[in-house]
Amino acid sequence: MKIRLSILGLALISSLSFFAFTVAEDPFTELLKKLEEFTRKYPQEKVHLHLDKPYYAIGDDIWFKAYVIDSKTSMPTNVSNILYVELINQKDSLLKQLRLPIQSGISWGDFKLPDPLTEGNYRIRAYTNWMNNAGPESFFEKTIKVGNLWTNKVLTKMTNNTIRFTNATGNVYANSQVNYEIQSGNKLVTRGKTLTNAAGEISLNMLNTQPARYTSGKVIATITLPTLEKIVKIIPIPAFINTVDVQFFPEGGNLVGGLPARIAIKAVNTNGLGENIGGRIVDEQNNEILTFETTYLGMGSVFFTPEFGENYTAQVKFKNGAEQNIKLPEVEKSGYMLAVNNLDSAKMTIKIALSPDLMNKGMLNLLIQHNGNAFFMAQVSTDRQAAAVVVPKDNIPSGIVQVTLFSASNQPVAERMVFVNNITEKIDLSVQNLNAIYHKRSKVEPIFRASNLNNPLQGNFSVAVTNASIVDPEPENESNILTSLLLTSELKGYIEKPNHYFLNDDEKTQKELDNLLLTQGWRKIDWSNLDFLPAQSAAKTVASTQYLPEKNLKISGRVTKGFGPMVNGKITLLSSLENSFPLDTLTDADGRFNFSPLNFSDSTKFVVQARTEKDKANVNIYLDSIPMPPISANTNNGDIETNVNETMMDYLKQSNTYFEEQYKRGFLNKAVQLKTVEIVEKKKTASKYSSNKAGRADLVFDAEDLKYSTSLSTFLPGKIPSIVIRGNKAYSLRGFPPLPVNIMIDGTIIRDYNLEDIVVSNIESIEVLVNRALAAIYGPDGSNGLIIITTKKGQNSYSMFAPGVVSFTPKGYYAPRQFYSPKYDIQSDLKPDLRTTVYWNPNIISGQDGTFKLDYFNTDRPGNYRIVIEGIDDFGYTVHQTFTYQVN
């Protein structure tokens, strides 16, 4: 079990002397109490997804297991019971969202990649509603390559500024017209059209001439095939112009005159990848102080003692021969030095130094904490200019810990992050009955034993078996339960090759990891949130709790009658579930109602009915909704692959054979791609049930446009000229300040609305009237424009905002599919077995003796098979371990 120091029993340790104090009189203990209270009141969660493969093909299934932990305890969460997992395409649009139940921090599910999708850099992100308070940067997010050879008519390969177009067999499309757009974010950079040459290539030389503000973007190329069919390809451009950003980070925070300092260096190119550099540091007289060179992924560090009043410059030399002068951070006259040596597996040594003017100013406090849990504290006297503190690691948990030095007035004056690898918190897996060599279709029955310090351990595990000869595991770039929960979830920005730091535990790797923390380390606890700094107490910030933890599914909302809430009104809930009964409740003093807990799956239809005490339906119902967090552009540039199909070609060819066999057996469908002539524009029309009296609209969106959207507040922004979305309402920019735009739902004008309350899946069409001539027929209600929504009346009786009755289909729990694993000892099958994922099981529980057994059959493909096991126990101990064997 993890050990956390009790505030009341905290031991004070110093290399100079030991101190005793009365807790009630010690202000630093009060600070720790506030830290404890803060982290208890605002717990944070982390999510990790174990995926069966590192990349996929159109036609594949994505299988995943979710592990959700409480950051403070590192144990399976009891904060949230609902998880959201989303699949996002290369256009940064939501393809599918799953809502999954969490039990003891565990959940699992899957995504199907149907053949109408295209190749690209997709993303999977996962979060709880509670995690929304910390923002999308706290979510689990993984960029995955998705290739397509099976149904692909056009393959592209971009080299420098040249794009080559071929078919799936490699034949080029010569003399074909290509219309292209180059975009950066949502902005159009340029567009044009050209013809492919005899080699099927076009050149876009203007890419190198774009302004510096365009750092990355994409090419949208539409090629016209000889059949007159138009195929659209989206090709990401991680960087228009490759430049390298170089930064210098003093350990502890500042350079102080006369105090020895360590400076970390990080050089990153515009593709988001580290790039090694060299150079020298000089003073104002151009005297060389030292030379430097980064050693891994553009990171390194150097030591020197700066002098106050001197300005230092780094003369950087890049690998292309270019040079650049970069000013180092200014040298402070007064301050502190904090240095950590973390190479010893049993202890870390912390050195503290201070400028002469800060001597004899009371006691300094050194704190080591992990996600709000204090694990070590020492008091350091200021009667000497330097001191050292030795910290044992045996009681410090695995992961990133925060080392902070506080002044005598409890001001944080120096800080840095350190990674601790505590072997006592690991789950060890041993295996029996796993042969080194097997035959095709042979049965594999390994027995695993989970233990901690040789004691049997009960845990929950997920297992993926793949043929590594087909599915390259990309070990250094692999995201796993260790990299996710211990490293990347604690650091800002993109982490390149995160698993590199876990593959070896040698001194070289430890130094590389330390350089990563010195450059990308950040503070989990924002000390300004703790009301202990007198100068900041008046401007104290409090963590946002706008989003509450979801414990179960519920249907809730507010009912109004006239201009106020309907109090003690009867609310009835009916559903399409079999053997279900109507549920009744009463509204409270604010007109609110809540049906909870509920348990229902996707596609379950509900009807909410509200009645007054006189049984009249002259009331309005407004349902609550869980807003979907915004989807921003993919910031993990280092994981974005320009030529997805090219890099995955070996896997795609193997998968193509498998998909064709599945298609012949009726297990897969292939969309029929019709040869069509060019259609200049297809005018969208509104639903035949539309109540638009004008008959025409400036813009029309249909159900097809909305099928991947979960809310109007995220769908509409940027799509309607002169209308903006603010606070989940529409406003016209024709006035100042912007004027509210009404909406009409099935003929009823709605003035007080929330776009999040409108269920997108029930919308047949949206018509937007911006032109005053079109909206004039609606009088004052259309004076600022009008948004007309028609629901799917032809399919159901949905009537959102209709007085007294609302029918809708909320998102329920997704029912995960079962992974197919053949049993060749029970039933023979002469058809070829070409699966790329050999075995997947997301829910394996070890027994009291720590053992669990696998039972599956190999495929018809030879190769080096790889078993990947991840898991967690009730104490938060984790494991990521691999085993291999050969199939001949």
Image: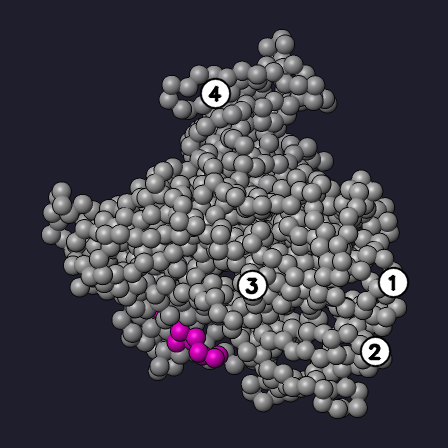
| Amino acid type of the residue that numbered disc 1 sits on in the rendered structure | Asn
Q: CA distance from mark 4 to mark 1?
A: 74 Å
Between 560 and 794, the one nearer to me in the picture: 560
| Amino acid type of the residue that numbered disc 3 sits on in the rendered structure | Tyr
Specify the label residue 494 is tagged with. 3
The residue at which mark 4 appears reads as 574
Between 190 and 667, the one nearer to me in the picture: 667
User: Is 15 contained in the magenta span?
Assistant: no
Q: Alpha-carbon neighbours of circle 1 within 10 Å: few (<14), some, or many (≥20)? A: few
- On the image, the x and y values in percent for residue 428 come to 40, 52
Above or below 91: residue 801: above
- Answer with mark 1 or mark 3, whichever residue precedes in sequence: 1
Would you say the residues marked 2 and 3 are in contact, meaning their CB atoms lie under 8 Å apart? no
- On the image, the x and y values in percent for residue 208 come to 56, 80
Above or below 364: residue 615: above
| Amino acid type of the residue that numbered disc 4 sits on in the rendered structure | Leu
The residue at which mark 2 appears reads as 308
| Amino acid type of the residue that numbered disc 2 sits on in the rendered structure | Phe
* Secondary structure of residue under mark 1: loop
* Magenta stretch bounds: 154-164
Q: CA distance from mark 4 to mark 3?
A: 47 Å
Can residue 185 be seen by looking at this rendering? no
Quadrant of the image containing the C terminus: bottom left
